[in-house]
Image: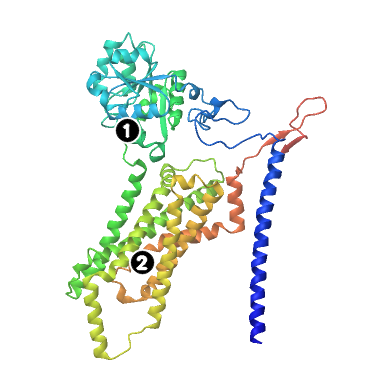
Amino acid sequence: MIRSTRSGRADDEARLKVGAFYFLFLHLFGRSRRARELKTKSAHFQPRFVVCPPGPRRALYGMPGGDMAKPLLDHQNTDSNLSLAPAAGSRTIGILGSGDFARSLSMRLVCSGFKVVVGSRNPKRNTSLFPSAVEVTCQADAIKKADIIFVAIFREHYTTLCDLNNELSGKVLVDVSNNAEINHHKESNAEYLASLLPTCIVVKGFNVISAWTLQSGSRDGNKQVFICSDNQEAKQAVAEIAHALGFIPVDMGALFSAREIENIPLRLLPAWKIPVFLALGLFLCFYTYNFIRQVLHPYIREKKNKFYKIPVEIVNTTLPCVAYVMLSLVYLPGVLAAIFQLYHCTKYRRFPDWLDQWLQHRKQIGLLSFFCAALHAVYSLCLPMRRSHRYLLLNEAVKQVERRTDAWVEEEVWRMEIYISFGIMALGLLSLLAITSLPSISNSLNWREFSFIQSTLGFVALVISTFHTLTYGWTRAFDENQYKFYLPPTFTLTLLVPCTIILAKLFFNFPCMSQRLQRIRGGWERNRYVKFTLPRASGEFSSGESSSIV
């Protein structure tokens, strides 16, 4: 048995070796035979395309060799509608000035395929500051070589161009200057330049673009370029240059609009002033209220020093109040607008100015609400890190040991678990609302998606925040010991506006109210009708029996 087993194994190994050699032979033979068949067939077949290694003067079949040397995508031919793009490499752009903006603009123009000539009062000294492809010469020579000239000098130096009035005659001057203050002069810089050089065509533009944006590219800064001029052709030419540089030109009308364009870079967050002052006012009010309840009351009534709560604990108590009220103020103007439309039964009656401004600042108010909520989350996580918290925890532990009682309170455990869970969900929804408020995100959403996130999910965030506040307060609103100096707990004050909004939203969702509101927003008006008069067979019109009222 042992011999037969060994011989069987040897036979199996021999068969495996023979089989391996057989399959290897078939593989090699079949591969070479297949190659010969393909070679024979290829002799009678001319390929349409071949893959060529990269190198000079390589071409595809049926194409001239010079076409392969050209790039498939050229920045000058990305938009076939631009009349300037094909001629970008042949057009010369002039720049008067050698400052930071002039250098950045020259680099951007050269990268976009333009020829650039810079006019400087000291060309020899400033040549090294510009790229080698830029020609730096005196101002008179630069003016002669270009039809469109960027004036990158300060307003105080405009009078130096009066000596070049003859050379500048008929040229297009692009004023890129800004003032130091809003409405610093009676007339704009562009209008002042046009009055000094009446034979020139002045265009205001590129003043809202910084030198850093020109260097880093339009993706790292503002892409809009505001342009205005009294000459439509010159304005169109400058708009084409802005488009070729990767910016979005915005036509602001005549040169009279230059005053408004020059004020744009000088404004400091104009849409944020009212929301910021509102948030600061709410913070001061709630902070003072919490200070009276948590610090002043124990100091007067119980002679306890709790001023250590001022930096962290009172701030952490104030921040959620501000965030909650600010979030409710985002949706309160929508409720007031619906009441206004239902009362007047029309959507064509203008809102009061205060309500219109309120509606326009909802985005900023919501972002400030998210900011306060995020700070509240950070402060809450840092509460156990305080030294005072450790001392209080040790004191409670010592007292617990002395009393020998169980510290577990089932009701407090459930209350804490529920209100923390609601707080996390509310913060998550507020984060989603804040992210979709970014222009890059909101522009990628259609109107239904954007309104669903901002309106529906925003209202859900308000409801969850209300649950978070209610579970935090629990039954303390009915405890007389919580009324310090007869002042109710802080959370009860914050619930007034949000609960009113939630009840109003539920009321507007009733079919009788929602349908009426939809009809009004669709154009329906009370006591207004359209009268149609049907023509008779003779072609005459009558307002009698053939009239219809809708």
Q: How far across and down, in percent of the image, does residue 380 sit?
A: 32, 66
Q: Amino acid at mark 1?
A: Ala
Q: Name the side, left or right, on which 140 lies relative to 170.
A: left
What's the mark number on residue 211?
1
Instruction: State the residue position of label 2.
Output: 491
Residue located at (20% from left, 74% from top)? 301
Proximity of marks 2 and 1: CB atoms separated by less than 8 Å:
no
Decide: is 522 above or below 233: below
Q: Residue furthest bottom?
A: 404
Dividing the picture into quadrants, the one containing residue 173 is top left
Quarter of the picture holding the N terminus: bottom right
Indicate which label's residue lies in the foreground, 2 or 1.
1
Going from N to C along the chain, the mark reached first, 2 or 1, is 1
Q: How far across and down, in percent of the image, does residue 155 sit?
A: 27, 23
Q: Amino acid at mark 2?
A: Phe
Residue located at (34% from left, 17% from top)? 194
Depth check, front residue: 83 or 65:
65
Quarter of the picture holding the C terminus: top right
Asked whether residue 485 is in view, the answer is no
